[in-house]
Image (tube, grey):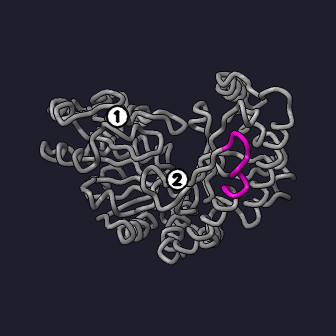
Amino acid sequence: MSDDICASIGLRPVINVSGTMTSLGASIVVPEAIAAMSSILPQFVEINDLQRKASAAIARLTGAEAGFVTASCSAGISLAVAGAITGNNLLAIEKLPDVTPEKNEVLVQMGHVVSYGAPVDQAIRLAGAKPVLIGQATSTHHFHMENAITERTAAAVYVVSHHVVDYGLLNLKEFVEIAHAKGVPVIVDAASEYDLRVFLEQGADIALYSGHKFLGGPTCGIVAGTKELVRNAFLQNMGIGRGMKVGKESIFGAMAALEAWEKRDHTGIRERETGYLNLWKQMLDDRPGVTALIEPDPTKNPLDRLRVILKPEEAHITAWDLADALAGGTPPIIVRDHEVEHQYFYLDPCNLHPGQERIVANRLAEELDKARASNEIIASPVENRGKRRFDAVLRWPD
């Protein structure tokens, strides 16, 4: 969307240095997907046959036996869990979520029960499943999982995200070994992950991806895995999946995004993004109270981000107030602020249009100069940020 289009409907033309965030529209859709969606929109197709074509493309790119496209990765969690519960029992599929078979428990590590905009365990419960949390928030051991598996266990969900606890928990290899030893399938939520093959190669039975994040496709989710489990998840479209359906344009757009992924110049993109990071770091280095560190992605995606650390007594502003100043300015710049109470935020370079990297640098300099010129430290109560956010949502659409 161009700035002119934004202005025509009264939207702020946001610059996104937060990352592939759904709340900001996730990513810049690749031209191939835009063209594919436009071409199929005037046509009538048999959706199930189109999904078969998508299955072949997903299988080729991920190494899965089969796949399909759904509304989102969150929808994929619910459908995969539902499929593990019902199998291909059409009556059971119709009765979800109120009436579920006895085998309806789903294991998830406590440190993986995070929110991506909604809680992970809610996506599990939507399928009529009972989440069974194993371990503690920062500690899960073999005995926690082994003793949680019973005759009622239908599946185990593993979450890959920058939000999860990244120490003290079972890694995917351990998680899969324990589950498979007792015949339990493993579903991996890999919504914002770059590698389309690694989770199935490490033994996951189903891997779930966002189509609209790193792939640069339309808003959708991709379900990939073994033929039987994928089929059972796909059958949920006759039940709870009806409200999670996707249109022809999303399916075909996802296929085009997958094919474009094969041809993408990943090395060239990384080099360009590194240039943005170096520009920002150079601008921030030697500023009082500011430390800028280039850091790798915590889930091992092939990208780096810039961590901007503030010492308010020297910079004259807190990290959260600087983040808010950037978001409230012209143009609005949205940073990655999920840990901002620790006096830092991140700048993510992966969703910038050419030239926006310099706008970001200039706005950072402008706000930091303004803060340094103030006689007092700009330090609002950090707890007010969350309150303002939810107050704004509760007032929607006003």
Residue 374 in the figure: left or right of residue 91: right
Image location (x, y in percent) of residue 71: 51, 50
In the rendered structure, does residue 284 fall within the stretch colored magenta? Answer: yes
| Quadrant holding the N terminus | bottom right
Residue on which the image places disc 1? 95
Give the magenta range: 281-290
Badge 1 density bin: few <14, some 14–19, many ≥20, Cα 10 Å: some
In the rendered image, which quarter contains the C terminus?
Answer: top right
Dividing the picture into quadrants, the one containing residue 28 is bottom right
The percent position of residue 295, horizontal first and vertical second, equals 52, 53
Residue 138's x, y, as percent?
A: 35, 31
Residue 156 shown in magenta: no
Q: Nearer the viewer, mark 2 or mark 1?
A: 2
Left or right: where 272 falls relative to 254:
right
In the rendered image, the vertical position of residue 273 relative to residue 80, given as above or below: below
Q: Is residue 325 above or below residue 287?
A: above
Q: Amino acid type of disc 1?
A: Lys
Residue type at tag 2: Glu
Q: Is residue 50 left or right of residue 16?
A: left
Q: Secondary structure at mark 2?
A: strand
Residue 295 numbered mark, or none: 2
Q: Earlier in the sequence, mark 2 or mark 1?
A: 1
Q: Secondary structure at mark 1?
A: helix
Asked if residue 111 is positioned above or below residue 178 in the image, the reply reads above
- 277 with respect to 356 (left or right): left
Q: Residues within 10 Å of mark 2 (few under 14, many from 20)?
A: few
**Residue at 46% across, 49% down:** 73
Task: Please indicate, yes or no, whether residue 20 appears anywhere in the rendered image.
Answer: no
